[in-house]
Image: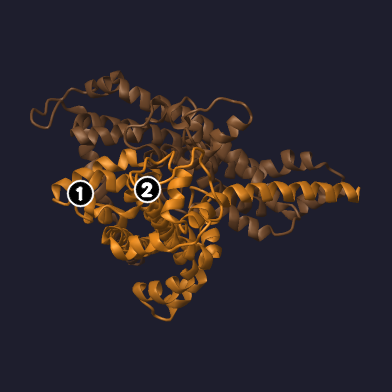
């Protein structure tokens, strides 16, 4: 009986390990390949990405784990020699940071409202937010485009930032967190003569610190990875974020593409390294549509 | 007197709540609700200049449009493949991590990590593996099979499906792990004492308690499968091989030609489909919720 148990667990472990390998390989390969010299890249992948640089091209494609010679050349090219990648990177930051900060800020005020006062109208509005949150881009991009056009924002960052700031995702999740704050805390503050704003900043927000972190992380990943909005709202290639631009470097400078792909992962991987616990908490709490 | 006071208090509360809600409500109104009203209006008229009401004509035209039909069909067939797999595999991962195996928390980290990696960063690897001269075809040749140009074949959706699962399974797994953690421990202990099999414990206890999560993950995956344009675009561009032409491709290409009537009709149709799906979710969550409590 006991032996059978060990056997089952062993199989389970091996299965997990196989899955883990599949989940990790694409990321790890991208990173290791980014240290490969351009000539090695050409010889390994020349058959796939039509290169103009010439040089030896291997007949078969070698998906290689570890480069023959480690080099930082691509990083030097991408980060120092040709500023266009840095500009795209900066574009990404300029788009994502204001969205994360202001979406969470506005959402925390709104979530407080949904937490403190309930009524038919307000739960109706909340319900509407949930529906809006679940709408795909096919629905929301047309309205966003129209407003941006009216306000003359097409081709500017604001056409993405403004709708992003008011996206209801954070409102929904923060409300769910805030409703778990014991009512007695709020009541006690009220008895002590605190106004609503004081209750919000001194009682409610400190209780929600970890929730705010986890929501900020979720919002960050979502927008760091954005493709749909810039494609429609930013026609100017210069203002595109790196998440869109990366796919257009493919031909010719493939080594550079690997390096820039790696650089683009770094912020989100760092956040993951330090904030995994928050992330998991945030996801686990999104697990039901109802408040 | 007291009654009047209460009324006053209530009104003051309402005003206060509105103050807190105002910034968000204003933004949602200006950037989503108001323009969506205009979208609905546009979907019912014949053109921004003439503005004649044509009722459903735009929708009829939309359904006659072969590009739209192709996109709808592809999106549907992709969702039918992706959603069940995204649910079943995530349950499997969550159950595996529930078992007493070493390195559990490391495995959780590994499974969740793709979520943090921008799709744009890993498409290169996908292209290397699934190119006509790519790694996967090398393997096929090794086994004496013919090479396939994966992204230009009927299997193209499978390539994208792998990327979709890679990216989304971790999130779903966390949701299921949270669901599993909510099952009353005593129930499983009693089952153990009475010598219930693992299969019985899974189907009769765990799955029953997980049913609201299953439902939620199903809807979430369905919505995510509508967003798979991102993966397709980064892998295959604006004009991919037929099976990969998604609804978002249709929308993007229509944005290019500025056909507001077509765009609006498509957005309205999508919104209606989504509302129906969400309504079903709410109904089902109610129903399953009662079942477990009772």
| Residue A74 pos. (x, y %) | 39, 59
Taking the image as shown, residue B73 lies to the left or right of residue A7, namely left
For marks 2 and 1, give the one nearer the viewer: 1
Q: Residue at x 29, y 57 (%)?
A: A88
| Residue A125 pos. (x, y %) | 35, 50
Q: Residue furthest bottom?
A: A192
| Residue B78 pos. (x, y %) | 47, 31
Chain B colour as displayed: brown
Q: Chain of mark 2?
A: A
Circle 2/circle 1 CB separation < 8 Å: no
Q: Earlier in the sequence, mark 2 or mark 1?
A: 2
Chain A colour as displayed: orange
Residue A248 appears anywhere in the view: yes
Residue tagged 2: A124
Q: Which mark is residue A236?
A: 1
Q: Vertical placement of A263 versus B119: above or below? A: below
| Residue B82 pos. (x, y %) | 52, 35
């Amino acid at each position: 009986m006991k032996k059978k148990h060990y056997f089952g667990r062993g199989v389970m472990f091996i299965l997990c390990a196989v899955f883990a390998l599949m989940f990790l390989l694409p990321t790890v390969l991208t990173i290791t390949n980014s240290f490969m010299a351009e000539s090695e890249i050409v010889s390994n992948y020349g058959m796939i990405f039509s290169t103009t640089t010439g040089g030896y091209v291997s007949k078969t494609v070698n998906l290689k784990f570890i480069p023959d010679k480690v080099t930082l050349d691509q990083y030097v090219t991408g980060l120092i020699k040709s500023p266009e990648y840095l500009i795209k990177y900066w574009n990404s930051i300029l788009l994502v940071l204001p969205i994360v900060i202001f979406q969470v800020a506005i959402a925390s005020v709104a979530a407080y409202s949904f937490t403190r006062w309930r009524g038919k109208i307000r739960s109706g509005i909340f319900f509407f937010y949930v529906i809006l949150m679940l709408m795909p881009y096919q629905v929301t991009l047309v309205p966003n485009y129209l407003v941006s056009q009216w306000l003359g924002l097409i081709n500017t960052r604001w056409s993405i930032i403004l709708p992003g700031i008011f996206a209801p995702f954070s409102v929904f999740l923060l409300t769910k967190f805030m409703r778990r704050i014991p009512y007695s805390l709020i009541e006690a503050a009220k008895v002590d003569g605190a106004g609503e704003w004081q209750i919000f900043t001194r009682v409610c927000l400190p209780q929600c610190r970890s929730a705010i972190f986890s929501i900020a992380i979720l919002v960050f990943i979502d927008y760091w990875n954005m493709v749909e909005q810039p494609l429609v709202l930013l026609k100017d290639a210069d203002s595109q974020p790196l998440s869109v631009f990366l796919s257009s470097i493919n031909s010719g400078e493939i080594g550079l593409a690997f390096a820039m792909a790696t650089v683009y992962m770094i912020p989100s991987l760092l956040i993951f390294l330090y904030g995994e616990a928050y992330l998991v908490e945030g996801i686990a709490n999104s697990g039901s549509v109802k408040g | 007197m007291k009654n009047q006071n209460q009324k006053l208090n209530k009104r003051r509360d309402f005003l206060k709540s509105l103050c807190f809600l105002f910034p968000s409500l204003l933004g949602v109104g200006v950037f989503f609700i108001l323009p969506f009203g205009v979208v609905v209006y546009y979907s019912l008229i014949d053109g921004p200049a003439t503005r004649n009401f044509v009722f459903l004509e735009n929708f009829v035209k939309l359904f006659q449009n072969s590009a739209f039909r192709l996109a709808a069909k592809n999106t549907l067939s992709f969702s039918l493949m992706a959603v069940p797999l995204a649910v079943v595999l995530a349950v499997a991962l969550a159950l595996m991590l529930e078992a007493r195996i070493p390195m559990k928390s490391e495995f959780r980290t590994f499974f969740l990590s793709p979520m943090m990696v921008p799709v744009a960063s890993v498409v290169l690897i996908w292209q290397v593996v699934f190119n006509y001269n790519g790694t996967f075809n090398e393997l096929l040749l090794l086994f004496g099979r013919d090479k396939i140009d994966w992204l230009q074949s009927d299997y193209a959706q499978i390539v994208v499906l792998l990327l979709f699962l890679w990216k989304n399974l971790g999130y779903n797994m966390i949701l299921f792990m949270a669901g599993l953690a909510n099952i009353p421990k005593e129930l499983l202990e009693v089952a153990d004492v009475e010598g219930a099999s693992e299969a019985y414990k899974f189907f009769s206890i765990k799955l029953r308690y997980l049913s609201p999560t299953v439902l939620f993950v199903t809807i979430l995956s369905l919505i995510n499968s509508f967003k798979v344009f991102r993966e397709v675009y980064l892998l295959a561009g604006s004009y991919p091989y037929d099976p990969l032409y998604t609804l978002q491709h249709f929308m993007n290409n229509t944005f290019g030609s500025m056909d507001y009537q077509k765009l609006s009709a498509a957005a309205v149709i999508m919104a209606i489909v989504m509302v129906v799906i969400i309504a079903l979710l709410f109904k089902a969550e109610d129903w399953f919720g009662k079942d477990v409590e009772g």
